[in-house]
Image (tube, rainbow, N blue to C red):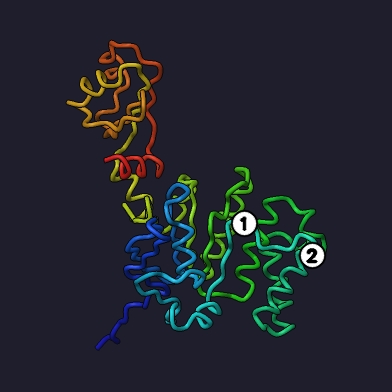
Amino acid sequence: MPPATTTPQPVLTAHGISKRYGSRVAVETLDLELAEGELYGLLGPNGAGKTTSIHMLSTLVRPDRGTIRVAGYDVLSQPVQVRAQIGLVFQDSALDRTLSAWENLLFCGQLYNMESAHIKQNIRSCLQLFKLWERRHEPVANLSGGMRRALDIARGVLHRPRVLFLDEPTTGLDVLNRRAIWNFLEQLRQTGLTLLLSTHYLEEARNCNRVAFMREGRIIGSGEPGALIHALGDHVLEIDTPTPAEHARRLGSTLGTPIRLDNRLLFAVRSDQADLGALQRNLREEVHSLQLRRPDLNDVYTWINCP
């Protein structure tokens, strides 16, 4: 008789957590469940509730209601135990720029009451992973923005947490540095670390295992990025025209109802509808531009946000 299999327990669960500041709803009835080694993205514009959600999950803000468990510990009744199991990378850097990279991590390790030999071993491995070993004795002020952000993440994983929270980890970085940070995050995920991050760079979040779109403190859609994009359609037809209502009426019968953004119309179309020549022949009125492209997560959010 084969041995019984057990379903692995999620490393993080949140049920019905909510937070208000006066009459303003910051987060409303948020539910999350993250598996070991998962990379999960909270997506949405500034003010959507992403930072408040992370602060509640990481013990920094007490929810008005709901329950949260991280690595088996209750966030409300066992916050000290939870903090030993998590790392947190804030939207604004927590580094002391007058200290070196090594000194920043050494101070962090001492705050976690790690043994000296263990601290030094972890510092070396972290700085090597994030390609900062050769710059370890330089003041943080001398490092580039991308290097400082990498050091922030190294600080968050120095004590080997089970879960790492990252609030807008690539904000303010150029494309190359943003790509480098995502490469580091993927390497961390492969070690079994669970990562939950927030970002308003929706195109980056395709690297996540799952994403959730937030608006006004609520999740309005979620799923695997590839599946969400595939479900939208094979292509997005984007038309810029001074007569959007006319073109929406003319094309709507064959392409479906579009999303209208000022003078732009967005149609989600299938491959058998993606004949640009036929479409152009049907556009007798003035059109400033016509583009047929592959959809991305920005398009998914647009359709979810503007049903």
Examine the image and state in which quarter residue 40 appears.
Answer: bottom left
Q: In terms of sequence position, does the residue under pointer 2 or pointer 1 come before the other?
A: 1
The disc label shown at residue 136, or none: none
Residue 119: x and y in percent read 71, 78
Residue 287: x and y in percent read 36, 15
Does residue 88 appear to the left or right of 2 in the view shown? right
Q: Residue at x 67, y 68 (%)?
A: 126
Residue 207: x and y in percent read 47, 53
Examine the image and state in which quarter residue 100 appears.
Answer: bottom right
Residues at badges 2 and 1 in contact (C-beta under 8 Å)? Answer: no
Q: Within 10 angstroms of label 1, few (less than 14), some, or many (20 or more) residues?
A: few
Instruction: Identify the amino acid type marked 2.
Output: Leu
Residue at numbered disc 1 = 92
Q: Residue at x 43, y 49 (%)?
A: 44
Q: Residue furthest bottom?
A: 1
Q: Residue at x 37, y 21 (%)?
A: 240
Seen from the viewer's position, the closer of residues 272 and 293 is: 293
Residue 283: x and y in percent read 28, 15
Residue at numbered disc 2 = 99
Asked if one can make out residue 193 in the rendered structure from this viewpoint, the answer is no
Instruction: Identify the amino acid type marked 1.
Output: Asp
Seen from the viewer's position, the closer of residues 21 and 113 is: 21
Asked if one can make out residue 209 in the rendered structure from this viewpoint, the answer is yes
Does residue 150 appear to the left or right of 291 in the view shown? right
Vertical placement of residue 297 versus 6, above or below: above
Seen from the viewer's position, the closer of residues 214 and 115 is: 214
Q: Residue furthest left?
A: 253
Q: Secondary structure at mark 1?
A: loop
User: For the residues marked 2 and 1, what is the alpha-carbon distance in whole angstroms?
Assistant: 17 Å
Vertical placement of residue 30 versus 246, above or below: below
Q: Within 10 angstroms of label 2, few (less than 14), some, or many (20 or more) residues?
A: some
